[in-house]
Amino acid sequence: WRGASYDLVSNNCCSFARELCLGLKVGESPAWVDRFARVLHAGREAARDAVDAGASVVQEAGQFAAEKGHEAGVVVHRAVTQQIPEAVEAAKPHVRTAVNEAIVHGQYVGRVVGVQVTKAAAVVERRASKFAEELPARAAEFQEQASVASSEVYRYAEPHLQRGLQNV
């Protein structure tokens, strides 16, 4: 119970009184005297045991992880250096086939689109030719309508103009 060995929970004044009573052979001190300290001590010991057990589990888990990590590294290394290049080589013929099919399909689509564009151009050309043929007749018709309209406007406006000129 000297300074360095004193412990508030397990080696305190209550535990000293208990040991003193036993040493004097007067019987044990009542249980209630140091019950709280004994409960705290038991709890602390259980916690230490749990921490030690947890540390052991963590250490074992760390070793397991290190071993599995190494195995995983070997698997990744093998995949990168061997399996991926093999997969790329195996895929090359399929990629070439897909590219060739895309080229052929593109040529087909180009021909189909070309035919459709040619047909559309022919329709546009026919309509433009028809419009060009009809244009002189339409222009003459418009000119005639404009002439009639201007004559009617003049006939309507003439009396008003005459009256306006007389008042000037």
Image (tube, rainbow, N blue to C red):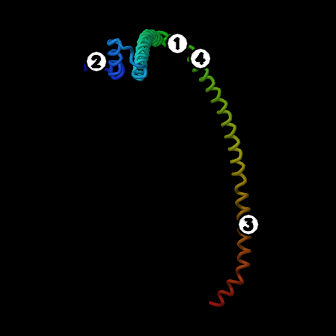
Residue type for callout 4: Thr
Reply above or below: 164 against 24. Answer: below
Q: Earlier in the sequence, mark 3 or mark 2?
A: 2
Q: Quarter of the image containing the C terminus?
A: bottom right
Q: Residue 145 carries which label?
A: 3
How far apart, in angstroms, are the residues tagged by discs 4 and 1?
16 Å
| Closer mark to the observer between disc 3 and disc 2 | 2
**Which residue corresponds to the image point at 39% horizontal and 18% vertical from the top-left?**
29
Cβ–Cβ below 8 Å for labels 4 and 1?
no
Residue type for callout 3: Gln
Q: In terms of image quadrants, where is residue 153?
A: bottom right
Q: Which of marks 3 and 1 is nearer the N terminus?
A: 1
Residue hosting label 2: 1
Residue hosting label 1: 87
Secondary structure at badge 4 equals: helix
Q: Which of 76 and 60 is in front in this view?
A: 60
Residue hosting label 4: 97
Q: Which of 85 and 67 is in front in this view?
A: 67
How far apart, in angstroms, are the residues tagged by discs 4 and 3?
68 Å
How far apart, in angstroms, are the residues tagged by discs 3 and 2?
131 Å
Q: Is residue 80 left or right of residue 168?
A: left
Residue type for callout 1: Ala
